[in-house]
Image (spheres, helix red, strand yellow):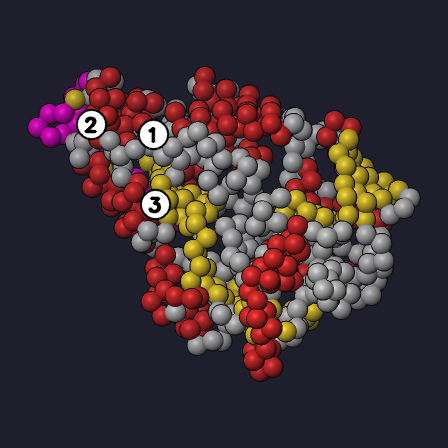
Amino acid sequence: MKKALATFVLLTLIALGSNRLLAQSGGELHFCLRSEPKTLNPLLAADDASETIRYLTGGVLVRVNRLTQEVEPELATSWKLTNGGKTITFQLRDGLRFSDGTPFSADDVAYTMQQLMDPALHSPTGDAFRSSDGKVETEVLPKNHVRITFPAPIAGLDRLFDQVAIMSAKSPQKELAVLGPYFVGENKAGSYLILKRNPNYWEKDPAGRPLPYIESVRLDIQQNRDIEMLRLTRGEIHFINSLDAEYFDKVVAQDPAMAHDAGASLDSEEMWFNQVASSPLPSYKKAWFTSTNFRRAISESINREDLARIVFRGHARPAVGPVSPANKFWFNAKLQAHPFDQKSALQRLTQDGFHLQDGVLKDRDGHAVEFSIITNAGNKYRERMATMIQQDLSGIGIKLNVVTLDFPSLIERITHTFDYEACLLGLVNDELDPNAQMTVWLSSADSHQWNPSQKTPATAWEAEIDKLMRAQASTLDPKKRKADFDKVQEIAWQQEPFIYLVNKNALSAVSPAVRNAHPVVLRPQVYWNIDQLSLTSEVARNR
């Protein structure tokens, strides 16, 4: 079966014309990991470095194309959902082998699922499949089919298998026997890993040439961003997958051809107020923070355009709500970012009895409006945002105090003592599906940050979000799920328990020596099509 990705690559090669002739198979791709992988077991991958290894080496049944955001066949040629969404049946490719030569079969899928769902393993990947209590049943069927049945329906079930690297049930190499384009050939702890081309990788390009094109990948462990940048400019590494705005501008200044801005990412920066009833805050401040008018007024008093332009050097967009526009299917396109309108903000505050007195905003009982916002020390972008928000709020008579804390202390305050007034942090999103945000939006969840672990919803709108999130998770109809989650976004936009500020852009830097690189907003931005990347003929000869 020819995949949509292969078609896209073919069209790209035609567009490149004679430049395509500069690329050839071979050579060694170099880039950096910012920490040592904590595990090479793909079922236990949770940190960025381990997930990078999983992506480059793991063979999966289906793959979410990072460009189109659609699910495409990989080790499985087709799949079908039945039994009300509790069962998925895969048709597997015939004749495949693991990197060490061990034959691949449905038995390996069954073995992988058994390991994945073993409670004793505590697999982070397996958590996404735990729809309810009960055993996951896997049946090996004739003609290379495998059927997996879950105790309850799982919305978006097929997409979850993008994260499940299939392991061999029989290979003596265990997790080191892989079905992806590369296998771990050398691992020098704390220093580097070398991945070598999998000689048994199943995929070929449209011309019938075996993939991947590049012979090996060297991953140097380098935590220092300045050294990583220096190595890029010296030509010692071929790309940096994710850049901060400041480093991105340095790349632009040195070699604009290397700089890639893919637009708004899935990640967001936001602030929120502490609405925990048992928190040690005075009652009048609790009244402020639980008021929709107060939260909306604060939101309207913040100039998001300035945050994007000044703090992130133009490499960010004013945020709309829980979903970034980069999430093509799930984003509610009817919503717009809240405008900067301090006149409207003061009108909202007046409805709650607030008033300006000698340039100071006071509540109906005469308390001057003053509060503190905490953020993590050392994050210069958040520190700058907090300072700009401080200046904005002074425009409506509010005194904002900025407090920076080491990260463990900050986490202690927002999750245990609740001894804080407002917090500024970011949310990293790796998943497109709204089910990945269940722990944020369910009122009973630990990560329902403004008021976590509620026994019953504290407000009617939180109860409505609970209802909608559970409804979208229990149906397989994409249109119904979309409608329900659109309403969740509308409620979040109206109530603003999180005041969403900006969506940072997905920034990367890629050497011209790398061919067919098309950086995207989804992780991994640069090497999502690793098997299609190649190096110029000169580089391939010299490496």
Closer to viewer: mark 3 or mark 1: 3
Q: Return the residue at label 1.
A: 280
Q: Is residue 135 left or right of residue 290?
A: right
Closer to viewer: mark 2 or mark 1: 2
Where is residue 71? Give x, y as percent. 66, 44
The segment highlighted magenta reads 356-374
- Looking at the rendered structure, the kind of residue marked 3 is Thr
> Which residue is rendered at x = 27% and y = 45% of the image?
306
Q: Return the residue at label 3.
A: 375
Magenta stretch containing residue 257, yes or no? no
Is there any visible trace of residue 408 in the rendered image?
no
Rendered view: 304 above or below 216: above
| Measured Cα–Cα span from mark 3 to mark 2 | 28 Å
Magenta stretch containing residue 370, yes or no? yes
| Measured Cα–Cα span from mark 2 to mark 1 | 32 Å
Rendered view: 70 above or below 257: above
Q: Is residue 280 left or right of residue 301?
A: right
At mark 1, the secondary structure is: loop
| Measured Cα–Cα span from mark 3 to mark 1 | 19 Å
Indicate which disc residue 343 carries.
2
> Which residue is rendered at x = 55% and y = 21% of the image?
467
